[in-house]
Image (spheres, grey):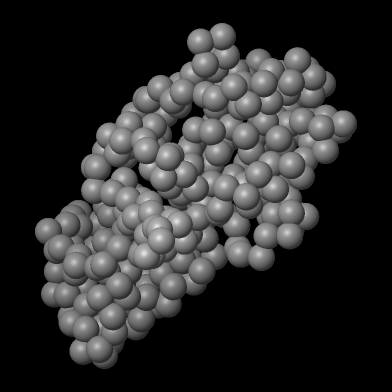
């Protein structure tokens, strides 16, 4: 059992890029689940019936943990059994019909426009690496791409003359995202300069490359981002996804309609995009309090 749990956690870290904190929480949840299975004499994953995971979920609820924690445990168990099914280690997913408890959505953390501006000023445009890094940062904030989408972009995905790019998001669904003038110029500077110094391999014409022509990785970009955030004096914990959150929130604060933002983010369900309207309303409330005579 432990072997399968370890394989699943490795899959989440390498393939899904989950954060260390999430992986640690999933590990705790699954180790507890493994203990319950051993207590029931279940040693092989093929012998797990629906009764075992449901019993574990019931024990979690009995501890009085929050709905959010219950949802996380269920997500860990569902993902684990889905993984076993995909690996043909099990014949079915016993939790496929179990619904998650209702959880009040947590508002995403965003950067202020001033923080974004300070961050974008950090790359040294006199150095090839700085030109590349500025292009990555400008592109991520200009488009709201996921970092996984950013590092998988190829040169032929760009159309800088028209001002858009093509990307493939979750489920390999393709979408077109517009580019602003600043991002276009940063990309042109990169493509006509540093990109020529480190050409990618013909079989893998990725847009953003490291020395030797290897493509940028999610972990590599995150390390670069954290370095620039420290240099900018930003105190909050900055993640690549925070630039995506900031992109959406800043657009809505300036009057963009929800459907357009949904399309640019590649959200299948508009309810996923609606979380940003809460942040936008908070912005309007602060604006009213600061500027209205009776605010």
The quadrant the N terminus occupies is: bottom left
**Residue 120 figure quarter:** top right
Which quadrant does the C terminus fall into?
bottom left
The correct choice, above or below, for 36 with respect to 256 in the image is: below
Identify the residue shown where x is 29% and y is 84%: 65
Residue at figure coordinates x 42%, y 77% from the top left: 28
Taking the image as shown, residue 36 lies to the left or right of residue 226, namely: left
Q: Nearer the viewer, residue 235 or 55?
A: 235
Please tell me whether residue 229 is drawn above or below residue 214 in the rendered image: below
Judged from this view, the residue extending furthest toward the top is 161
Residue furthest out toward the bottom: 63
- Classify 109 as above or below 14: below
Residue 145: give x, y in percent of width and height: 48, 37
Q: Is residue 187 visible?
A: no
Q: Which residue is most to the right? A: 126
Specify whether residue 274 is in view.
Answer: yes
Estimate the x, y position of residue 118 in percent, counting from the top left: 70, 48
Q: Is residue 277 left or right of residue 116?
A: left
Residue 50, percent from left and from top: 14, 69
Residue 231 in the image: x percent, y percent? 77, 55
The quarter of the displayed image where residue 139 is located:
top right
- Image quadrant assignment for residue 40: bottom left
Of residue 214 and residue 164, the one placed in the foreground of this image is 164
């Amino acid at each position: 059992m432990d072997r399968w749990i370890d394989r699943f956690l490795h899959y989440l870290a390498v393939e899904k890029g989950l954060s260390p904190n999430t992986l640690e929480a999933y590990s705790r949840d699954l180790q507890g689940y493994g203990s319950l299975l051993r207590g029931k004499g279940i040693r092989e994953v093929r012998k797990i019936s629906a009764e075992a995971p449901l019993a574990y979920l019931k024990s979690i609820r009995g501890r009085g943990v929050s709905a959010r924690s219950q949802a996380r445990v269920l997500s860990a168990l569902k993902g684990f059994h889905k993984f076993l099914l995909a690996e043909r280690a099990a014949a079915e997913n016993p939790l496929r019909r179990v619904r998650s408890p209702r959880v009040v959505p947590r508002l995403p953390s965003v950067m202020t426009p001033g923080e974004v501006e300070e961050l974008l000023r950090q790359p040294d445009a006199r150095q090839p690496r700085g030109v590349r890094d500025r292009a990555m940062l400008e592109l991520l904030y200009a488009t709201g791409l996921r970092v996984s989408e950013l590092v998988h972009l190829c040169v032929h995905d760009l159309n800088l003359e028209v001002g858009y790019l093509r990307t493939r998001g979750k489920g390999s669904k393709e979408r077109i995202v517009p580019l602003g003038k600043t991002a276009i110029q940063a990309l042109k500077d990169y493509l006509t300069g540093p990109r020529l110094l480190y050409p990618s391999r013909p079989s893998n014409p990725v847009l953003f490359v490291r020395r030797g022509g290897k493509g940028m990785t999610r972990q590599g970009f995150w390390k670069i981002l954290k370095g620039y955030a420290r240099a900018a004096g930003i105190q909050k914990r900055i993640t690549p996804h925070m630039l995506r959150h900031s992109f959406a929130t800043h657009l809505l604060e300036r009057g963009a309609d929800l459907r357009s933002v949904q399309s640019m983010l590649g959200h299948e369900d508009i309810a996923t995009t609606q979380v940003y309207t809460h942040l936008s309303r908070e912005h309007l409330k602060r604006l009213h309090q600061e500027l209205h005579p009776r605010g």
